[in-house]
Amino acid sequence: MGERLGEGAWGCGCGPDCFTLDEDGFTCHKVLDEPEVWRVELLMHDTFLPSVNAFVVLDGGEALVVDAGTPDWFNDTRLARALVRLGVDPSATSLFCTHAHIDHTGLARELCEAGARVLVPEGVAGDMRRFAVRAWRDEMARRLAAEGTPAAEAVELADAIWDHTLNFEREGVSFETVPVGGHVGVGRWSFEVVSATGHTQGQCVLWEPAARVAFLGDAVLFLCSTCIGFWGEGEDPLGAQLETLSRLAAMGIEHAFMGHGLQQGDVAERCRANAAHHERRSARALAAISERPGRSGYELVPALGWRAPFEHWGETPALTRWFLVSESIAHLDHLVAIDAVLREKDADGVSRYRPA
Ligand SMILES: [Zn+2]
Ligand SMILES: [Zn+2]
């Protein structure tokens, strides 16, 4: 792991159980005593989210790192400094990745090369094979075009997002898979691997019922609603996410550690509020379809109540347009899955929506 930031600019106190990782205000601080959990804040790229978390659980000379940040030299150095300062022995360390997105898997190679054991849920390995390949980019562009996105923009949007999933097999990162219901241990603690499909198909969270601690990846955030993009036609990622939110709300989680930001209040309440937010948008989509049947997915995007600059659509960054179009399509997929609307192809092969 690298050492590329200025020397002497880190390791300073920033309060009890806190130390700086650089001169830019990135820190590592203890967020829980039992089990002992440290939050390593790393720089996030490309989105409005300010940072991404890697968590380090310490017990009995062992360490469990949950998620591995966005890959860049500075983040590599920050994470390395955190582990050195926490006295982590890489050969007694496991890395668990909640999902395959690059901001949660980016530094897996560095940890693996330092001697850590890399663990991913079976479904995450599946996502890596399915989504981190060129064929998925082409499939996305095809799907966007079939939803009425102009051909050039369909390719542009697919290009903006498709490689945000990392494939460890292609990258040569050796890893082991863990099944849903399996366990990941660190010292005295044993975390259950629980499916949290929705944000990605294979995402899993870690759950320790005695201390009521969960590592949630991007299953639910307090900073914003988790992005739900489409998968394939006929699939229902939003429905999956609603089920996940209801399952998480019922688990009795007391201490939640998310991929971005920190817990702000009750987890069950947040899950229910986020589910209600999605339900409202789906209801809006249904109302828009009923009001004027026959529109394509792309034509329906502005009717779904996004706070977005539709009047400056052309100047809106591709990634932002991708989030808006993709989550809108996920809502339409959900309405089709629950038999609330019908999807029919017109003569040009573009899907048109009308109430069932
Ligand atoms: Zn994610
Ligand atoms: Zn994330």
Image (cartoon, helix red, strand yellow):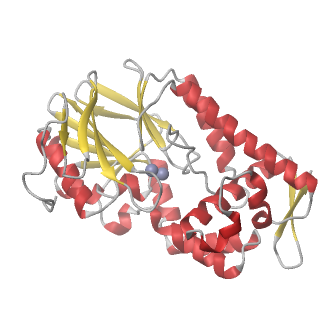
* Whether residue 231 is visible: no
Q: Is residue 70 toward the left or the right of residue 221 in the image?
A: left
Q: Is residue 356 toward the left or the right of residue 338 in the image?
A: right
Q: Quadrant of the N terminus?
A: bottom left
Extreme top residue here? 210
Residue 40 sits in which quadrant?
Answer: top left
User: Where is 280 relative to 249, above or below?
Assistant: below
Task: Please tell me which residue is depicted at 71% across the width and 67% down the height of the picture.
Answer: 311
* Whether residue 144 is visible: yes
Task: Please tell me which residue is depicted at 19% across the width and 36% down the height of the picture.
Answer: 14
User: Where is 71 relative to 99, above or below?
Assistant: below
| Residue nearer the viewer, 61 or 159 | 159
Coordinates of residue 125 in the picture (x, y in percent):
44, 55
Extreme front residue here? 311
Q: Is residue 190 toward the left or the right of residue 27 in the image?
A: right
User: Where is 247 relative to 329, above or below?
Assistant: above
Extreme left residue here? 8
